[in-house]
Amino acid sequence: MKTAFALMLGLLAVLPVGAHFEVTPFPKVVQAGVATGGLISSDPHAFVVYRVEVPPQAQRLLVTTSGGAGNVDVFVRKGAHPTYNGAQTDYSSKYPGTRQQIRIPEPEAGTWFVGLQADGGYLGLRLLVQAPVMKGALLQPIFDPPPGIYPASVSARIKPKVKKSVTRFTTDGNDPDDESTTIPASVILTEDTTLKARSYTAAGSEGPVGEASYQIRPPGDVIDLVSTKTISHLASAKGGRHLFRVTVAAGERLAIQTEGGKGKSALAVLFGEAPPTGKKVKGEATLRGANRVVIAETQAGDYYIALDATGPFSGRALMASVAGDGPDLMPWAEALRPYVSVEEFDPISCEVQEELIGAGQRRLLRYTTEVRNVGSLDMVMPAPEDNPFFEYHACHGHYHFKGFAGSRLLDLEGNELKVSRKVSFCLLDNIRWERGAKTVKKYNCGSQGIQAGWGDVYDSGLPGQWIEIGDLPAGDYQLELTVNPDGILTESNYENNVVRIPVTIPEG
């Protein structure tokens, strides 16, 4: 099987060194000027990070929490995740209660991260991020319908946000200039296109470039799916249809689910051919559901999955999960999100005492490890006491399974440049990624394992979640992560234990 698109999921959370707690498997994006309310943290130490895009010429960045009950600390950082307790952050607010505020004058445009750290837990919290632009600043044009993957041609409109201006656009990937074509009433897109647009005032001032990428699939085109790999950013006008195919063996469990985005859609699944359109009729073998369909015991061959637009929708994600007979561990590539960090390690720190790294200043490529059990049965770990495959970590106060994951940095030809020490893990239920999985956590550091449909996350801020890169020059590389590298744990499938992603090491 093959996948047709790059996968666009991420994970935003940072955890304390002493343990790791529940995080979210999807990016939490907060829109500037739009409040997010009803936030809850029953975990007394949880740390969740939100992402916000700050526009050019922003007067200030104002981050405010309020309402509800409990205690929360707030950390804000430009370009990278803040870390637990603010060990690495640009701004912080740590007053008692839920009322916190951080004000940053004239922030640099780009991506900022806001970390909410529970201090005993909170309930009903409201988060508001504001980034008002300076008076007279030009704004980016917006695009309608939203960018995404469409199953047919799109009539896209470019809407200026600046009064008494001329807005120009391009479709060739270049930024518009004062000689580019002015926007028409709509642009008909029949193939993959990146629209770019910017506004100009009568005095000749130019605004920032707005950008939107559209992928256009020919009507009836079939997208092949890989088990547990999400295809994101699906969109359609009313009446449109995305069609997918997944190949399975006999007797497996096939679960299809959609989530996220705005609008209305419905699933239809049929073995051997595309599902018919319209409502289910008597005797029809098609399985239908608003956002989830499960086939408990599959036939061997191809299942066709239709995602039908019962109304316009955008920003939807679809995933098919095929579970064999047994546990199956799989690293989740979208969670890696690597970044470079220069840090000082004290000789008495846990990292140095456990021989993960030497004392002093070190340049690291940090990343998050998320491991999902995509099999049909739980991964149940044996008792650690007197077991040679476990080691007791005095700094953490519990046992870890030795050498559970390892990573390498490769050049673009696949040659090894840097290698990490194999990292030991305390395996537990951390995130419930499969909607049909049991809803209650079962495994922890005292009784280790990962339920079917659950995953464990070791955040980039935790010890060992790095490759030491020293004076490696800036450039393009590959990050490879392997779980269960020695095959000690019994799985139904070992072929999905390695992932690679491209990574760019910046200057400095």
Image (tube, grey):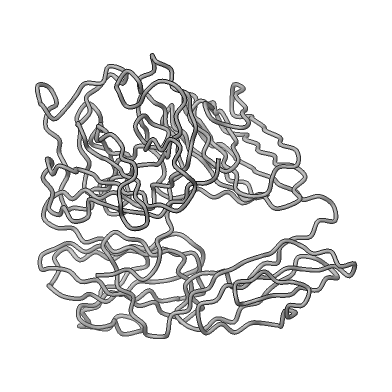
Q: Identify the image quadrant of residue 316.
A: bottom left
Residue at the image point whose x is 48% and y is 47% from the top:
505
Q: Is residue 409 left or right of residue 346?
A: left
Q: Identify the image quadrant of residue 140.
A: bottom right
Residue at the image point whose x is 25% and y is 50% from the top:
330
In the image, farthest residue toward the top:
348
Report the label total.
0
82 or 357: nearer the eye?
357
Question: What percent of the width, then of the height, locates residue 64?
Answer: 65, 36
Q: Is residue 198 left or right of residue 400?
A: right
476 or 119: nearer the eye?
476
Q: Is residue 453 left or right of residue 83?
A: left
Residue at the image point whose x is 64% and y is 42% from the top:
128
281 or 274: nearer the eye?
274
Residue at the image point whose x is 13% and y is 68% from the top:
249
Question: What percent of the width, then of the height, locates residue 32?
Answer: 65, 49
Is the residue 476 above or below the residue 423 in the image? below
User: In which quadrant of the rendered image does the C terminus lie?
Assistant: top right
Question: What percent of the width, then of the height, locates residue 104?
Answer: 71, 36
Q: Is residue 111 left or right of residue 304?
A: right
Is the residue 434 above or below the residue 301 in the image? above
Q: Identify the image quadrant of residue 71.
A: top right
User: In which quadrant of the rendered image does the N terminus lie?
Assistant: bottom left
